[in-house]
Amino acid sequence: MKQLNIAIVGASGAVGQELLRVLEQRQFPIRQLTLFGSERSAGSTYLFAGREYTVQLLRQEPEDFKDIDVAFCSAGGSVSLAYAETITKYGCLMIDNSNAFRMQEDVPLVVPEINPEDALSRPKGIIANPNCTTIQMVVALGAIEKLSHIRRVHVATYQAASGAGASAMAELEEQSRELVEGRKVTVKKFAHQLMYNLIPQVDVFMDNDYTKEEMKMYHETRKIMHSDILVSATCVRVPVMRAHSEVIWVECEHELRIDEVRKAFSETPGIVLVDTPAEGEYPMPLHVTEKDPVFVGRIRKDLSNPHGISFWCVSDQIRKGAALNAVQIAEWLIAHGDLK
């Protein structure tokens, strides 16, 4: 297998660090690795495969990316927008983890288990990584869609601090210490105290009183699945360090049996079925953290709709919800001879 020149833009962030771990664990074929970051992170050093790498300052210099085959970008939407032309000018493939390009018609939005072929058509040289909550949901929905077309989905998310980055995870840890010690709680990253609390707001509110995060799930799901599926989401931040959870209600065109839904989940690559509720066996963030698959359980009929199925879904937000999905896109392209 040909080795590639790889760059990580935003190497010091939570997703950038996870990208380093995923690339090493999966023995991605790397000939040369280059790390880029802001003025604050430039000069930092990180170990990868036993070798030390220094973060370089990200500059508006296309020559910095001239010999790079793939750049994994996780530095935020504003950085992705500002540097996209710099990164792609000489043919470097940009796999972007931000929301900057997700809904642009000429940028594919890819989850390899669902629509990998979309990655082959990328006129801007950019492939967008979907939102973390969308990724784990569509992996699960894909198994059901093969049984019967899905008409609509209602989803409530329980999103970990990791979804807001490394500083949010640090704030949750700090709040825990402050509460134990009886000190005033630090609230900077979120709208309210997260520890011992739930916040029914992820991202900003839109004109329709849904948050931007909730609307991402609506629009991104339809684009990824090439479907007229209707999605209504409520996104909630919970005091969990990492791994998002979702309760999902699905209405299909045809009535489905629970045994065939379980079978579909158990046979779908990327999904692990954990569904023995009478014995207390179902997916939980505590057990899913730092694991690759999407975990599904609590599968049952919707008592209000004969065409409805309800289930519980948990996945590590930093891995499958971000870093792993991006790496899997590149792996699929390599396997199909697109990255030569």
Image (spheres, rainbow, N blue to C red):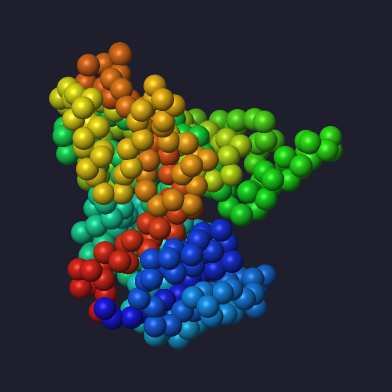
Q: Is residue 193 left or right of residue 30?
A: right
**Residue 281: percent from the left, percent from the top?**
41, 30
Nearer-the-camera pick, 137 or 93: 137
Position of residue 267 relative to residue 61, above or below, is above
Question: Can the viewer see residue 280 in this picture?
Answer: yes
Residue 264 higher or lower than 113, as above or below = above
Residue 141 sits in quarter: top left
Residue 73 on image: x %, y %: 46, 66
On the image, which quarter does residue 124 sit in?
bottom left
Task: Report the residue that reaches farthest toward the top.
Answer: 304
Residue at the extreme front of the image, as rendered: 279
Residue under the image location 37 percent in, 71 percent down: 28
Q: What residue is rendered at 25% in x and 32% in y?
A: 262
Residue at 29% across, 28% down? 250
Q: Residue at x 64, y 30 (%)?
A: 197
Residue 54 rendering spot, x and y as whole percentages? 59, 79
